[in-house]
Image: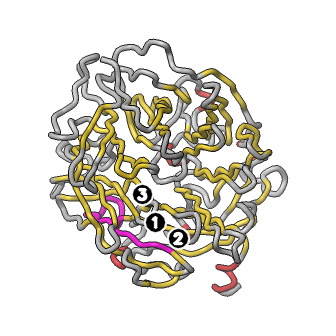
Amino acid sequence: MNATAEHGRDWELQQACGTLARGLARIALLALICASVVPSPAAPAGEPAGLITFNDDGAWCWFQDERALIHDGKLIIASVANGSHDPARRGDIEIVTYDMASGRASRSELYDRLEPDDHAVPALWLRNDDRLLAVFAKHGSEDHFYGRLTASPGDFTQWEPPTLFSPSASSRVTYANLHFLSAENAGRGRLYLFFRGLGGSFKPSFATSDNGGQTWTRGTVVINVPLAFRHRPYVKYASDGRDTIHLLYTDGHPRDFDNSVYHVFYRDGVLHRSDGQAIRGLDEGLSSPQEGACVFRGDKDNVAWVSDLHLSPEGRPVAVYSVQKNAAGLRSGDEQAGQDHRYRYASWDGNAWCDHEIAFAGTRLYVGEDDYTGNICLDPDRLNTVYISTNADPTNGAPLISATDHRRHFEIFRGLTADGGATWAWSPITRDSTADNLRPIVPKWDSDHCALLWFRGEYRSYRDYQAEIVGHVFPAATNVRSTP
């Protein structure tokens, strides 16, 4: 088969119950557990009032989206269990559906003990027929994605059997991201799956589906890096749901490269710089990260990693990311490495990127992943609002020492700006905690409400954690604060 035919080949999502033998022994029957998760009437010291525990065992990486959705009064949350309370759940891929009217939740097991690694968290997409698609993969050790589709419209607790999609036998895939463009495919819409690892490339790649994720057509590498194998850009994606997908990305892993941050957008088959200048077709991809528009110029003492990306009502991108400071000459895992991170906020004004340092992000999460921060997210319905996890005072960098256990912990703060990111007002969501509060996310909802989610506990590595998924559901104007 020639290259053109190979790239145009449809790779069926094969039914796991009969068409593919590989891995079927690991697939368990759907497990559904119903439980009340209404908040306790009185919060203990160090715990925010009104805090909801959605899942007692779970965490996520931040390079898969969407990890949470809101639809028809239900909050849907994806995560990976680590077996903190029940060893039989170690590596389970799970979905929690929380009914905001009743305060009850159901937990669905999408795959039994797939891999105890937060990189296996699913990406979620709600189809036009109100059925939910979840796509996930192991952390780069297999050639295929796993797909689950809900059995009935509007019911997010019952799922059809798993399906598999392999872009190629040599692929080693991870980081699923799903984006639907309604204007493509002659107005019938096209679903994009962005991921890492087509053909063993270890690079950002894509596939497409014209039938709601039932079958997929393999694409190409989106961002190439003309350097050593396994040197890979990290990407955050955002789309308008109509005809445009934005990409915010780095040169590579911050452990290996003094990362800058870049932006391109895809429209009508072509990749463009932020100002609309065409680069080349998506089917060709970028020949290097530097072909995109530079948002932030990194160096040895300012090494960036992307965190979140959303679009304004006018379709302009707004981005947040972290920067490790003063790391020149340090090796991964050195005692001095990863001791000072900052958060930054950047927005495109139609002519240029307006970029600001906004907060102290504190220290690394653990030795060896010196660029892992508690992370920052945007509120997609209010892009002047961010939520951060930090173990330092956001305004001056002073360590946050809990009055409850006298230890340093990562806490959640909300930041508000009224001048495009130049200045910020910070208020605590958690304080005086007895565990770390990490990787906040806010699913898109509406202008009157907000759901803030994160996981809290002990995070020793992406394969070793004892954490629970918690959060708040509150009116947007509510100033949620912890109780002393």
Inter-mark Cα distance, 3 to 1: 12 Å
Position of 335 with respect to 14 (left or right) is: left
Q: Quadrant of residue 297?
A: bottom left
Q: Nearer the viewer, mark 1 or mark 2?
A: 1
Q: Position of residue 333 (x, y in %)?
A: 26, 46
At label 3, counting other C-alpha atoms closer than 10 Å, the crowd grade (few under 14, some 14-19, many 20 or more) is: many
Under circle 3, the secondary element is strand
Label 2 belongs to which residue?
Answer: 244
Inter-mark Cα distance, 1 to 2: 9 Å
Q: Nearer the viewer, mark 3 or mark 1?
A: 1
Residue 255 drawn in magenta: yes
Q: Position of residue 140 (x, y in %)?
A: 53, 56
At label 2, counting other C-alpha atoms closer than 10 Å, the crowd grade (few under 14, some 14-19, many 20 or more) is: many
Label 1 belongs to which residue?
Answer: 315
Q: Are marks 1 and 2 in contact (CB under 8 Å)?
A: yes
Give the magenta-colored segment's residue range: 250-266
Under circle 2, the secondary element is strand
Label 3 belongs to which residue?
Answer: 309
Q: Say which label, 3 or 1, has the lower sequence index.
A: 3
Q: Position of residue 415 (x, y in %)?
A: 30, 42
